Image (tube, rainbow, N blue to C red):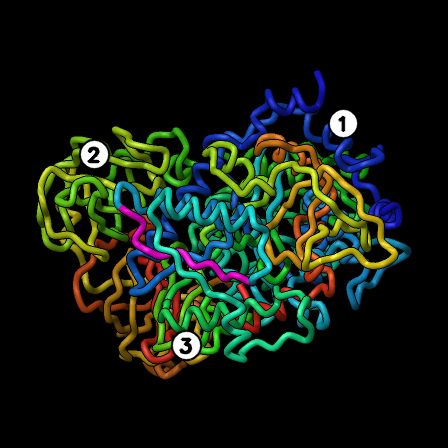
Amino acid sequence: MTGLLATADDLPPSPALRAPSPTRGEEIFGHAFLSTNMTTSSRPLRFISCGSVDDGKSTLIGRLLFDSKSLMIDQIDTLSRARGAQTRAGELDLSLVTDGLEAEREQGITIDVAYRYFATPKRKFIIADAPGHEQYTRNMVTGASKSDVAVILIDVTKLDFSGDAVQLLPQTKRHSAIAGLLGIKHIVVAVNKMDAIDFDRAKFERVVAAFALIASSLQLAEFTAVPISALKGDGVVAHTTNTAWFEGSSLLETLEAIELDASSEGTSNAVGDNTSATHIAVQYVTRDAEDDHRRWIMGDVADASIQVGDSIRVFPSGAQALVTAINTPRGPASVAQVGEAVAIGLDRQVDVARGDWIIAERRSENANEVSGANRITATLAWLDNAPLTTGRRLLARHGTRWLPARVSKVTRRLDLQSAHWIDETESAGGTDVNANDIVEATIEFASALPITAYTTSAARGAIVLVDPGTHATAAAAMVR
Amino acid sequence: MTARDAFLSSEFRATDAHLNWLEDEAISILREVFGAFERPAILCSCGKDSLVVLHLAMKAAAPGKLPVPIVHIDTGHNFPEVIAFREALVARHGLKLIVGHLDDSIRRGTIRLAHPLESRNRHQTVTLLETIEANRFDAVVGGARRDEEKARAKERVFSHRDSFGQWQPRAQRPELWNLYNTQLAPNENFRVFPISNWTELDVWNYIARENIALPSIYYTHRREVVERNGLLVPVTDITPPKEDETVVSRDVRFRTVGDISCTCPVPSTAANAHDIVLETITATNSERGATRMDDRANDAAMERRKKEGYF
């Protein structure tokens, strides 16, 4: 085993690991895990890492896993044995940590979204690692749909600092545009390879200014920029003398400090947004094991909390009832928060099945929202290798309901190079919508849905389109 | 204060929000299975991960009854403690149990062993696929986690399998939000992994919090073992010591439960789930690396087995 540990010790020490302890366990108890107050009081933070292999994305993830001690000795050993492992001067190639499939390791590329897990004393993290090669949009849309935060990696060695203004690469615009479309509220810009430009503060600030222009044109939420060197470790877990001029937090500290709002906090103690009506897409209805006449309606609480005594309406039937009981995974409750997987009991028998919605009309001003729509405008990320055929019948999933749908018209197209929307003119009307294209389109459904804008509710504003012949997932749609 | 006391008094045991979030996600996935499929089943090896999934499935169905059978692929090389545990579990909860016997596949000639005491782990795939086909299951729930292994890190929660049960890593369906694409053609099926996002530590924290019963071999016990290639190999009828090996008696526990011929215990005095949480956060080897001879064979071993239809 000493041989394996020696491999790990060959790594350039990161700032947080200046005095390695003899064994990993002691190290954990020695300083890393007990030096701060251990709280895992929030749900895991999910972030997507955006960038290509060349930007050092895989190295960054390897660095986060390694420095947070989420890698085990045998995994490090596997890395050093892996075919194609190119070690520079005894350094372990951290980027190999994230290359999951044999085909990928041989070709030195990543094919598909991979999920990684690491924890610090303050928080647990789930990384969606989306590869940056072909199919990038498809993979990033997939990873971003489940992420709270986008970490956008910028490789400073690829930028031209000779002119007045720094031009960021098209891929940075693309990553930012997709993060914005998927409604990611927290953007962290990791300005990487700072070691290659001597940790030049002025250059870092010019990159930040250039990103601010993109963020503004895409109407992105606020962003935080951090100078780092994923390879050397500066700024990732902690800042070093190299980045002492930087007043902000390290990348990891920034991620640890991000506060999720109540509506996305899942099962936190935070009270849901009570300005909107509760919606539950019905997943399953079951009979009570003890009482054959009692039925329980199951699904995830969306948009606002639900409580015993709420009056509900079933969509689409319109049947009404009162909530008499709520079961959460933690047991019976008088109230359940957004994100909780609940079973609810009603005061009377109503006809309800998978695919329906339960809508709590505690707030009367929202009663008119329930009428539903069967024709909407949406941003469409086309994912299927077969191009979109306007007017062709597709299968749509909204909530727990499957129904026929068609894309009737494509109105605009997002130019991912410039991050600008361009009108589809009549003359260009014949342009194909291909895999990885993002367009604005009109979608028609076979029946009305309780749909709303994606920015208002991801639960009701997101739709997946599926090819009825191949069953391939054809598109992700976000209602505008 | 010792490190152990500090740990036990700390909140690192991931109570509350973190485990609740994982629990809600898993239960929601299981309700998709109950609601969206005609003939689902839960694969249960009586290993800790599948017992966590079974516990979650019973919660997902509550206050109703578990609406699906559990399936055990029996290699015939079982730890007797595990089979005894299975029978007690089925009786206690009134579960419907379907057992796929590897020995039946051998009798049918669909599995041919190179030699009688060969590891049966790899051959499980054949019996699993035969059991799925015989029962016409359209969704089979398993306890795999993405943190276990590199190929698993890329697998979907709803993992589509063709009529040969094969996983096609390069043709996976994008999985967006929680809007799972559950569409199937005849004879295809899904493998569904509700605890994809759990780590080994999460699993042990949850077992401790929920007081989930496990087979006794998960906790410390005296066992005769030999040391082989840095692993402790249990001495059984199926895995006898080699001529030059010395049999020693050690305090050990198993970190995974699989076929006897390829599952090794680790030295441990952990007597309960809390002790194991403590051991887990100080562990230096990943779960499979420490205990599974089959996965050590090759870095891509899991990827290849999954393509063949393995879980």
Label located before the other in sequence (2 or 1): 1
Of all chains, the one bearing label 2 is A
- Span shown in magenta: B65-75
Residue B170 in view here: no
Residue designated by label 2: A325
**Is disc 2 placed on a helix, strand or loop?**
strand
Q: Which of A147 and A19 is in front in this view?
A: A19
As drawn, A376 above or below B187: above
As drawn, B95 above or below A346: below
Q: What residue type is labelled 3?
A: Val
At 33% across and 73% down in the image, what residue appears? A410
Q: Report if residue A359 lies within the magenta region.
A: no
Residue designated by label 3: A433
Q: In which quarter of the image is the C terminus of chain A?
A: bottom left
Q: Report if residue B69 lies within the magenta region.
A: yes
Q: Distance between the residues labelled 3 and 1?
A: 56 Å
Q: Which of B43 and A82 is in front in this view?
A: B43
Are the residues at dot 3 and dot 2 in contact (C-beta closer than 8 Å)? no
- The dot on residue A30 is 1
Indicate the position of residue A114 as horizontal and vertical percent values: 58, 58
